[in-house]
Structures are given as C-alpha cells and as structure tokens.
Amino acid sequence: ETGVTQTPRHLVMGMTNKKSLKCEQHLGHNAMYWYKQSAKKPLELMFVYNFKEQTENNSVPSRFSPECPNSSHLFLHLHTLQPEDSALYLCASSQEPDGTSGNTIYFGEGSWLTVV
Amino acid sequence: GQNIDQPTEMTATEGAIVQINCTYQTSGFNGLFWYQQHAGEAPTFLSYNVLDGLEEKGRFSSFLSRSKGYSYLLLKELQMKDSASYLCAVRDSNYQLIWGAGTKLIIKP
C-alpha cells in the first residue's frame, strides 16, 4: 500500500470508446502526475498538477484529457485511443513538484490499458 | 538530449552480491533516485543521492559520482524477492525527473 490508489487496475477498450482512469492519494501531497510505462522503455511523464493547476503537458495527444478536481484526486479521460496507447498508466504524487531535497514520488499500482 | 543508461537485464545467484550501474547525461543535476518495481506492481522508492559517495540502507547501498555522471545500486545477500526491475532516475536543472528504462534483475537459487 503506497498511499496512491488507482482504478481500474485493468481496462480493455475499443478505439471508439470513452473511459476514465481514476487516481486518489491519501498522503496529503500537493502534486500529482500521470506517467505512461511501456515495455522496456523509460517512464514517460504525461501531465503534472500542482495544487490542482496543470503545470506540465508533455506534448500528449488530445485523446488523453486530464482532470484534477482537488489535490487528492486525478483523472485521465480517454477517447478514440489507438492500439499503440496500450500500456501501463501510473499515477504518482509528491509533496512538491520541485525544489525540496529528496521530494520522493510515490506511485500507484497502475492501470493496465489495452486498446483493441 | 538527456539520457539515462542502465543494463536491460542482469542475472545473479541467491545469497550473492550484484551491482546495477546507471550512467546519465542530463542538463543539470538535482539528485538521483533508485526505485524497485516488482512485476505488476508500483515502483517503490529505494534511495536518493545528491552528494558524491555511498548511501547505505540495510542490504541496499547506492553510490554517486557527479563528476563521472555515474551511480550504482549494490544489493547484498540477494534474496529471491529481490527479483524485480530497478529504475534509475535523475532530477535535472528544471527539477524534472529523467528516467532510465530499468534493469530487470533475475535471481536464481
């Protein structure tokens, strides 16, 4: 139990579907992140939110739409995805997005997404 | 460009010692992290180095040389449960985390 909870753990969706991934952190952190993890590739940072405000969008296609209603919750809305979007999507949180020494990032278990 | 290199896969024997290397080329440096990730699970924090030298934490130690752009994770008295992927990440001058692709460590009896 890392203090970061993601649902669903597994999701299979067609290319025309609309679905959402949910993340909740119970650590009192200010910053939340979405990462994409593909096999044998480095973690790819997708979005960063600091105090509910989006501070980073790493050229992510618009078919991925994040939402952060408060500092504890983060969503990733998915629509018209492509098969190459199949991957593990990790949510993470930290006390601050930068500056503090250490500033360890805590990850959720991830949501395995398969696009068919 | 920014780059983190670590071996793709390593194999070691239960009870032995293994060293996983990480070399980096980043725009600035504000710390280096090691994470452990078991298959199907979340990456979990192992260690953080910001100054040169060795940080020891039980069976795990992490070393950093900033002048060489080099770190290693040393695992002693290997146990089967240490079979996992080990991720190296560097925080650059913009405090962005740059990640390596991870090293899959296989422990054999």
Image (cartoon, rainbow, N blue to C red):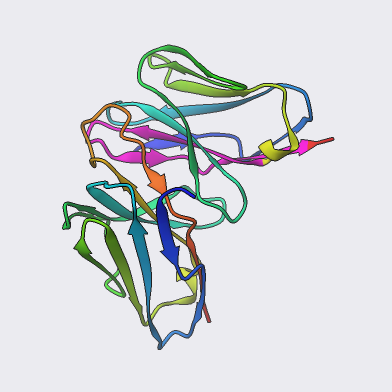
Residue B90 vs A42, above or below: the answer is above
Q: Residue at x 54, y 23 (%)?
A: B72
Q: Residue at x 42, y 59 (%)?
A: A5
Instruction: In this rendered view, identify the residue nearer to me: A67 or A27.
Output: A27
Residue B92 at x, y percent in the picture: 29, 32
Whether B39 is among the magenta residues is no
Residue B85 at x, y percent in the picture: 60, 42
Residue B5 at x, y percent in the picture: 50, 34
How many marks overall? Answer: 0
* Residue that extends furthest to the top in the rendered view of this protein: B53
Judge left or right: residue B22 versus residue B96: right
Q: Residue at x 22, y 37 (%)?
A: A98
Judge left or right: residue B32 versus residue B41: left
Residue B16 vs A61, above or below: the answer is above
Residue A60 visible within the image: no
Whether B86 is among the magenta residues is yes
Residue B31 at x, y percent in the picture: 34, 26
| Residue span colored magenta | B84-107
Residue B68 visible within the image: yes
Residue B64 vs B81, above or below: the answer is above
